[in-house]
Image (cartoon, rainbow, N blue to C red):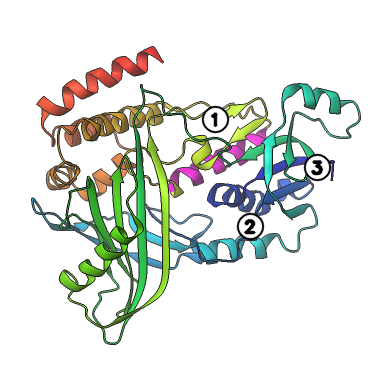
């Protein structure tokens, strides 16, 4: 291989393909040589992304379903969430992959290679290559077959090593199993989704169900936990089966599709860049530590990268004040959960009970004002959260 490119996208997951789509949609990049490398050909419906937004973005043409209202259930508080001006949206993995691949199929400047990336190349190796290159070589990758590729920038969403289990950080996981089911008769309201249903056992930790109806007879039912360890496969399966029977009151249905996943929810500080190796997606710390949501933050980051490239600005983009503020709030929540100061279902019930749903969503997106932040924080017990906040502020100051 040993080719030179302007940009290399290492990993064609949500972050890599979001960046690729933004490049492919902008004429500035039509003369740039771009290599995309992934071990998979992205032909399976392996995941579903849900997110909320006020305005349409680049992936609006493949939004599979939209909800204007959401249900919140718990044993402490239940309500219908009016989320205006937001909409809650779903994109299926298979549609996302196909959309991007179809877009780039006729673009000769973009090369797709099905291969595994072994590692990012170090500075010494890059320096040795610079004299023989036609491009400015400041980044590169080695594939598992021993070949290499070089570029001005490598955008990597690959976690090459496990997240370090440092004692100063909290390491939770959002882990889930989902069934897309179809019923023989109409039972769902496709205009309203269940955002969180905590009326399930909390014995393992913060646990809830999603129900995302896409028609009167189809819905994605997902069992989700925020805990520090995974569970046996049968626990997830049994929980979904029991919920469909006991809460949804559905006896006859078929399973059309299954999905499962694990997303890190951690206060570990992921590096955003190392030289011209730019980390994106989960590898760049774009999964929110308090919720596991990543799709929206990935879109913000990839849009910022594209704008910076076009303007010739540095990609050594540090976190904004809003992002740092959100990072602190996330750490406080994980602190409370880690030390079992208050159950997660009670925390979320208190927050949604005391605030407008749109305010909570802006808070979760790191887009809320300080006034809104203070109002949301006043919804939870000060005696529990204030000491946690002070401890986390001290820890962040020492980093």
- Identified at 58% across, 61% down, the residue is 97
Left or right of 75: which side holds 239?
Answer: right
Q: In front of the other: label 2 or label 1?
A: 2
Indicate the quadrant containing the C terminus: top left, top right, bottom left or bottom right.
Answer: top left
Q: In front of the other: label 1 or label 3?
A: 3
In this rendering, the answer to whether 206 lies above or below 315 is below
Left or right of 131: which side holds 210?
Answer: left
Task: Determine if the magenta segment contains residue 232.
Answer: no
Circle 3 residue: 147
How packed mark 3 is, by other alpha carbons closer than 10 Å (few <14, some 14-19, many 20 or more), is few
Q: Tell me, yes or no, if residue 193 can be seen here.
A: no
Q: Tell me, yes or no, if residue 371 can be seen here.
A: yes
Q: Residue furthest bottom?
A: 184
How packed mark 2 is, by other alpha carbons closer than 10 Å (few <14, some 14-19, many 20 or more), is some
Residue interval drawn in magenta: 296-311
Callouts 1 and 3 close, C-beta under 8 Å:
no
Left or right of 242: which side holds 180?
Answer: right
Distance in Å between CA atoms under marks 2 and 3: 18 Å
- Identified at 41% across, 67% down, the residue is 258
Distance in Å between CA atoms under marks 1 and 3: 26 Å
Q: Secondary structure at mark 2?
A: loop
Horizontal and vertical percent for residue 290?
32, 39
Circle 1 residue: 272
Horizontal and vertical percent for residue 190?
30, 73
In this rendering, the answer to whether 281 lies above or below 270 is below
Horizontal and vertical percent for residue 175?
36, 50
Left or right of 391: which side holds 298?
Answer: right
Q: Earlier in the sequence, mark 2 or mark 1?
A: 2
Q: Of 378 and 49, which appears nearest the observer?
A: 49
Horizontal and vertical percent for residue 280?
55, 39
Circle 2 residue: 40
């Amino acid at each position: 291989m040993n080719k030179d490119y302007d940009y290399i996208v290492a990993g064609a997951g949500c972050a890599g393909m979001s960046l690729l789509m933004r490049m492919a949609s902008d004429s500035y990049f039509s003369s740039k040589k771009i290599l995309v490398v992934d071990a998979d050909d992205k032909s399976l419906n392996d995941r579903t992304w849900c997110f909320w937004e006020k305005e349409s973005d680049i992936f609006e043409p493949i939004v599979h379903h939209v909800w204007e209202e959401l249900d919140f259930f718990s044993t402490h508080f239940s309500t219908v969430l009016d989320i205006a001006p937001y909409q809650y949206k779903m994109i299926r993995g298979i549609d996302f992959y196909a959309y991007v691949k179809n877009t780039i199929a006729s673009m000769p400047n973009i090369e797709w290679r099905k291969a595994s990336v072994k590692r990012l190349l170090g500075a010494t190796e890059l320096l040795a290559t610079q004299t023989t290159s036609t491009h400015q070589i400041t980044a590169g990758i080695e594939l598992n077959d021993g070949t290499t590729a070089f570029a001005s920038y490598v955008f990597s969403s690959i976690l090459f090593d496990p997240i370090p289990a440092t004692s100063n950080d909290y390491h939770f996981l959002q882990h889930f199993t989902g069934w897309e089911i179809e019923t023989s008769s109409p039972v769902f309201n496709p205009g309203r989704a269940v955002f969180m249903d905590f009326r399930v056992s909390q014995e393992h930790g913060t646990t809830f169900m999603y129900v995302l109806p896409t028609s009167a007879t189809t819905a994605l039912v997902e069992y989700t936990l925020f805990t520090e360890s995974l569970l046996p496969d049968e626990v997830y399966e049994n929980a979904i089966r029991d919920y469909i029977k006991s809460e949804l009151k559905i006896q006859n249905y078929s399973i059309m599709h299954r999905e499962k996943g694990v997303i890190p929810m951690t206060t570990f500080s992921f590096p955003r860049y190392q030289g011209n190796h730019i980390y994106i997606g989960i590898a760049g710390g774009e999964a929110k530590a308090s919720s596991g949501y990543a799709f929206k933050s990935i879109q913000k980051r990839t849009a910022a990268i594209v704008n910076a490239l076009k303007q010739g600005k540095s990609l050594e983009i540090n976190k904004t004040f809003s992002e740092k503020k959100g990072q602190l709030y996330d750490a406080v929540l994980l602190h409370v959960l880690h030390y079992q100061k208050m159950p997660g279902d009670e925390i979320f019930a208190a927050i949604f009970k005391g605030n407008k749903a749109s305010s909570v969503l802006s808070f979760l997106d790191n887009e809320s004002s300080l006034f809104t932040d203070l109002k949301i924080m006043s919804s939870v017990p000060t005696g529990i959260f204030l000491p946690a906040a002070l401890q986390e502020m001290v820890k962040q100051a020492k980093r």
